[in-house]
Amino acid sequence: MALFGALLLALLAGAHAELPGCKIRVTSKALDLVKQEGLRFLEQELETITIPDLRGREGHFYYNISEKVYEFLSTFITSGMRFLLNQQICPVLYHAGMVLLNSLLDTVPVRSSVDDLVGIDYSLLKDPVASTSNLDMDFRGAFFPLAERNWSLPNRAVEPQLQEEERMVYVAFSEFFFDSAMESYFRAGALQLSLVGDKVPHDLDMLLRATYFGSIVLLSPAVIDSPLKLELRVLAPPRCTIKPSGTTVSVTASVTIALVPSDQPEVQLSSMTMDARLNAKMALRGKALRTQLDLRRFRIYSNQSALESLALIPLQAPLKTMLQIGVMPMLNERMWRGVQIPLPEGINFVREVVTNHAGFLTIGADLHFAKGLREVIEKNRPASRDPLASSAPPPSTTAA
């Protein structure tokens, strides 16, 4: 019974385990590169060691070893030389290795802001899994509105899988990763746009006035020539769909057309619903995930009647053109700033390749050291710390 109860608890715990929105695989090729850079760092550390001249006698053996000239003769290693290794060189190597590891980990962003509205959480969900050829890590990979730091979106997406090993690093993102971003921006009130007066393209302004001419001529003369207002407001968080054929984002928004006379309430001419589908292309630049959006499908219909929906058909093409020319560039400019991938400072992705799967996508890339390890460590090392004061590793702050 005790065994059955333990098994039941384990199954329940697994059923409620949080799924990762982001996974990272570090292959042996990357570990070899890091090892080479680490050895270079250790060599630099050893070059900084200053050892006084050693003179003395051990039985019938006299020795006089000057600084920087140490010939290790296997048959004549004395207790004095063992003392030198144990007391001076080994602690430096140990400390250098610990400084290297902790300094790199300290530069990995765990929970940070993306911009003024939204942040991202890269907390590890469980201990990394190491094999003979890979190191796999599961991250929460969830965005959140900065004004609601305790808010979280339940992850019901497909868990991303990593099978490839050809590149140095593979990063996998599920649909949840992107859905949490779009829902966070929706909750932050960022998914809306208002164009008034000169901000409305001239040709579109003329077309809208012609379309609603019957309603406009019935208004008072003081209102007829008022500036036109075009407002787009996303009605629900957009949703991402990842298939082997590509990635799409579905958006439903309201479109309101009104006149805004000076010192008077605005006069609404029409309110309609817009359904749009965007194609999304992902890319890694440096260590930022960037997205390029392209408007593919677009449809508008009236909230009032089918008859008005027919009347809106002439607006379909110009509104789509307005979105492509006036809205998509602004949206892509923001998206192209990118989201940082949890990679240590000084290391960037190069030669990336994107592969779409059912419910998730993977990006394979090689690594490039944009900064030397010594530069990264010196930048993040507290100025008051004596590197030889203790052989204990400095505390890591990656979970802070």
Image (tube, helix red, strand yellow):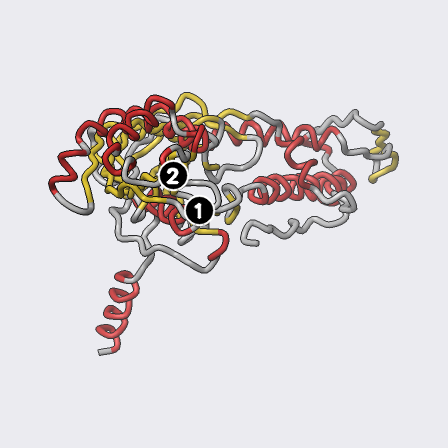
The secondary element bearing badge 1 is classed as: loop
- The span from disc 1 to disc 2 (Cα, nearest Å) is 9 Å
Residue at position x 81%, y 33% in the image: 50
Q: Where is residue 367 in the image (x, y as percent from the top left)?
A: 47, 27
The secondary element bearing badge 2 is classed as: helix
Decide if residue 209 is on the left or right side of residue 369: left
Decide if residue 267 is on the left or right side of residue 389: left
- The residue type indicated by label 1 comes to Gln
- Sequence-wise, which precedes: disc 1 or disc 2? 2
In this view, the residue in front, 239 or 46, is 239
Q: Position of residue 61 (x, y in %)?
A: 82, 34
To which residue does mark 2 refer? 223
* Residue 89 seen in render: yes
In this view, the residue in front, 124 or 112, is 112
Identify the disc placed on residue 264: 1
Q: Where is residue 352 in the image (x, y as percent from the top left)?
A: 38, 24
Q: Quadrant of residue 336?
A: top left
